[in-house]
Image (cartoon, rainbow, N blue to C red):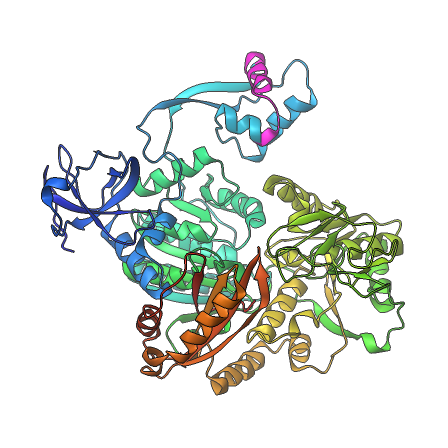
Amino acid sequence: MTQAEFYSEGELVGVLTAQPLDRVLDYKAPEGGCFPGAFVEVPLGPRKVLGVVWGAGKGDYDRSKIRSVIRVLDVAPMREEMQLFLQKAGEYTLTPLSAMLRLATRAPGLSDPPSMQKVYRPSGRQPDRMTEARARVLATLADYGGLAFTLKELAETAGVSTGVVKGLVQQGAVLEEDRPRDLPFPSLDPDRAGKALTEDQEAAAQALCAGIAAGHYGTTLLRGVTGSGKTEVYLEAVAECLRQGRQALVLLPEIALTAEFLTRVEARFGAKPAEWHSGVTMTERRRIWKMVGQGGAEMVIGARSALFLPFRDLGLIVVDEEHDTSYKQEDGVLYNARDMAVLRASICGARVVLASATPSLESWTNAEAGKYDKLALTSRFGDAVLPDMRAIDMRGEQLPSDRWISNTLRREVLARVEKGEQALLFINRRGYAPITLCRACGHQIGCDHCDARMVEHRFQKRLVCHQCGETKPMPETCPNCGAEGRLAPVGPGVERLAEEAAALFPDARVVTLSSDMFGSARALKAQIKAIAEGGADIIIGTQLVAKGHNFPLLTLVGVIDADLGLQGSDLRAAERTFQLMRQVAGRAGRSERKGLALLQTYQPEHPVIRAIIAGDEERFWRAEAEERRHAGVPPFGRMAGIILSSPDVQDVFDLGNDMARRDGPLRQVGAQVFGPAPAPIARIRGRHRVRLLVKADKGAPLQAALARWLAQFRYGNQTRVSVDIDPQSFY
């Protein structure tokens, strides 16, 4: 489809909508014409829908029946580089272009005309009389750094009625203002003094700044041990990007990290940047989307979906903790934000910084092969030194069957608590117990809609399915045999560990950190801040605590089950265990106090455990790379997962067998098909799931072959086909 500089009224234009049509539709340009990339409102059947002028119309339809664009929206047009990014990302992930456009238009009210609205923000004054409801409103405004809310948003976020907010307005404690709905963000000052850098930090920062000043694409892997100051280094790269008049995007893997990170950014640049993730209000979401496109937001801190914001001039993308699995979108459009960041930067001439203490094997391999630049920070910032790491051989510990904290670990925790320091006990399992078993008949309580065991969450007094979210009250009797009082929890979760810690350390303040135990991101951030300020002696946590938090008093990390991630057939099991254990251990000793990490294991001789204890990362990566190379799997081969699902198990098996037989298009590029086989979790939300795995050589044109292969088959209305290029999980 060709691009013109402008389409005059009545000219045919091709409009892509976010509706599931997977084709560009012809319309007539509206009165006054429109530019390529213009966001428009068009009629589609009886509805009005949002679309983008993708190029010239094809004209292969009866012109008299072609309808006109209703209007052009008052937002910056989509740039050609963004169109190309969506197109290439869709081709790589085998995703329809309409679904890619949905990712790029996830902001409410884009079609609303510019208008004024009443917004509410703190005045700094206190009301004459403070009530619990009023305190919640003022706390909400403070938590969001003085951002403006609409009346409805403020009331809902604080959990009060709108009357409470209006009462605070009358008291002068909250200001009510008329303002344009969407205003630019405050300017950031790149020349404001940052923290003093060490010699190797300064060298790394200068190398990154030189790359940005060059003004063309490049990717740098920034490796540094935990606590080495990677953030301060890449913030200098952000500063250089801002000096060049370009925009910067920093991706974080976890919403809970944003509060501490925003504070650091504000200290460095004198103002807060835009913040994009699921916890942001709808008003702010629309404002960010529009301001990014107009250049009114110089820097965005965001989750993976921030990659699809309409940046006017993107000069730098930082992917912090680039190895983190949460960068992989596992439903809807299946993509890896790390890979898409590199793709987007290559199109718009931006630099990419992949920052991690334990990089993914893919990034390590690209850096070793010279595709990425390499920078390394080898020592911790200031007086902090790396923690000692030791294994506790659980085969020699005499523990009752209902205990998981070894005597050795218990003694070390007590020693830390007595000195006024903090200890972290880590287990990567949410809930109280992963299995609820009937001791009378052996029945394990499973989900009614999935082939998965339900997890007891004792704090909620419910069983929860971690696949579909289904919950049910904890039963008194066995649903299989009816026996009373014979249901027992099997295995530990984070809640059960907290219960054991409270019994073993009765005088200590025990706090549990798990994402499903907090009703809001705000409450989670508040708890993390309280811990950092010394509000706990013992922290019980899941992998949430492994990501970027700085607890100055924390000197001991105890990993309860270091063997947990080594089980199963996941090709990345060793890599993930190594990364997680190193990241968790890195929480200890981040100030001047020396840290210690203890790993409880029944396999102290396992190569991964030995590599973690030895701290010989290069040796681990080389051994892991050689194993993957020998097996021909990523990053030395290509893989795609195909999941077929339907309410009818026979339908998906019949289709899977037919697909395995008719694999000609795949064999033409040297690819192999394995399966069909029931997926490890063979039923989710009542849908039976069958998996096929496609494996090919590194250079094979896999996507084109997959597209030809999949086009051979007809799919029933109840059948869904999901294609996962470069799968990260195999459930």
Residue 146 lies, with reference to residue 532, above or below; the image says above
Residue 728 seen in the figure = no
Q: Position of residue 432 (x, y in %)?
A: 76, 55
Q: Residue drawn 44% across and 63% down?
A: 722
Residue closest to the eye, 444 or 312: 444
| Front-most of residues 571 and 555 | 571
Q: Is residue 429 above or below residue 150?
A: below
Q: Assign the C terminus to one quadrant of the image.
A: bottom right
The residue located at (49%, 85%) in the rendering is 631
Give percent across and percent down for residue 294: 30, 40
From the viewer's perspective, is residue 168 above or below residue 488? Answer: above
- Tell me which corner region of the image, top left, top right, bottom left or bottom right, holds residue 344: bottom left
Q: Is residue 233 visible?
A: yes
644 horizontally vs 217: left or right: right
Q: 487 or 713: nearer the eye? A: 713
The residue positioned 76% from the left and 48% from the top of the image is 536
Task: Tell me where the magenta segment starts and ends, as one range.
Answer: 157-171
Residue 623 percent across, percent down from the top left: 55, 84
412 drawn magenta: no
Q: Residue at x 35, y 64 (%)?
A: 94
The main secondary structure of the magenta stretch is helix
Residue 388 lies, in percent from the top left, at 71, 70
Please tell me how many numbered marks the rendered image carries. 0
Q: Does the magenta stretch include residue 164?
A: yes
